[in-house]
Amino acid sequence: MKRLVFILVCLVIACPAKADFTGADLHSICTDNQDLCDFWITGFMSGMFGSQATAQKENVTPVSCLPGGMTESEARIIVEKYMRDHPERLHLSARDTVFTAFNLAFPCNRFVPMLPEAKAATNGEANPPSTPILIPVQEKDGSYIVPVLINKAITLNFIINSDLPDVSVPADIVTTLVQTRTIEDTDFIGTQPYILADGSSIPSPTFRIRSLTMNKTVIENVIASVAPAGELTLGQSFLTRFKSWSIDKAKQALVLSP
């Protein structure tokens, strides 16, 4: 417990929110130096393979399913295509750029239905597969915010952000969740590299959220990562658990298709 809290505190101190090595930086490197580009991408891939193996060992859904035997040039082509297709997203960190490219190319899709107690709360009727799930959201400064109950213990506001590869929780909030036992030591399943502005990296813990509850809909075993700072976000590790999703502005709702 003390070691984990120490790592989280170090993340808060060492990694200010604007200290990211961005996707634009990675794009510049890949344009100028193919070998260095391969070095960065394979470094990120190593972290993803580690998290993928750990998630599968823990019998939870990985964020992405990278195929074995993929070459450096094949990986670079995937990432470079994503960066060419999405220049508007290159302000995000290089880590998020690479992770999102691979998550979209090799998704692991699995929807976990409502738990029995959630069904009871809806008079015993679960959402049928063909019925969209509507989750009320609040719009603020161009973003959409949804209250989420974490592990049936505490409700926090998350921003929906499909640009990010996973559910992301700032280190200071994770520290509080650990100290209050909302997240247990056994929920932590590995680490992935977080790239600092100077190009160096530090380990960033990944963990399993046992349940996320929104408007009586429960999603189990969601992989999340610890961010040095910033907002709580619902990224691809949550959104890809559904066949599709959208924002209905008229109804002010997140629409999820199981």
Image (spheres, grey):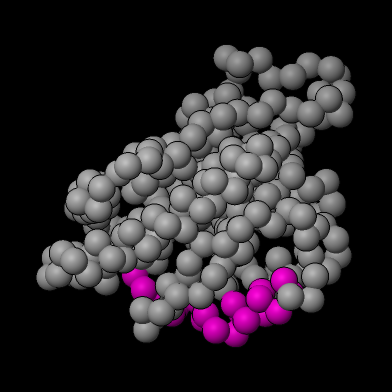
Is 172 situated above or below 168? below
Residue at 85%, 61% in the rendered image: 181
Horizontal side, residue 40 vs residue 139: left or right: left
Q: Nearer the viewer, residue 123 or 69?
A: 69
Q: Is residue 5 magenta?
A: yes
Q: Nearer the viewer, residue 3 or 174?
A: 3
Quadrant where the image shows the C terminus: top right
Image quarter hosting the N terminus: bottom right
Q: Position of residue 202 (x, y in %)?
A: 51, 75
Residue 206: x percent and y percent?
A: 61, 58
Q: Is residue 156 visible?
A: yes
What x and y, as percent, mark residue 214?
A: 71, 40
Q: Is residue 98 left or right of residue 184?
A: left
Residue 136 placement, left or right of 180: left
Which residue sits at x=34%, y=70%? 22
Q: Is residue 99 left or right of residue 240?
A: left
Give above or below for 63 relative to 217: below
Does 144 appear above or below 106? below
Q: Indicate the quadrant where residue 105 lies.
A: top left
Residue at image position (25%, 53%) is 72
Measuring from the top left, give residue 59's x and y in whole percent. Answer: 66, 37
Magenta stretch holds residue 151:
no
- The magenta span reads 4-24
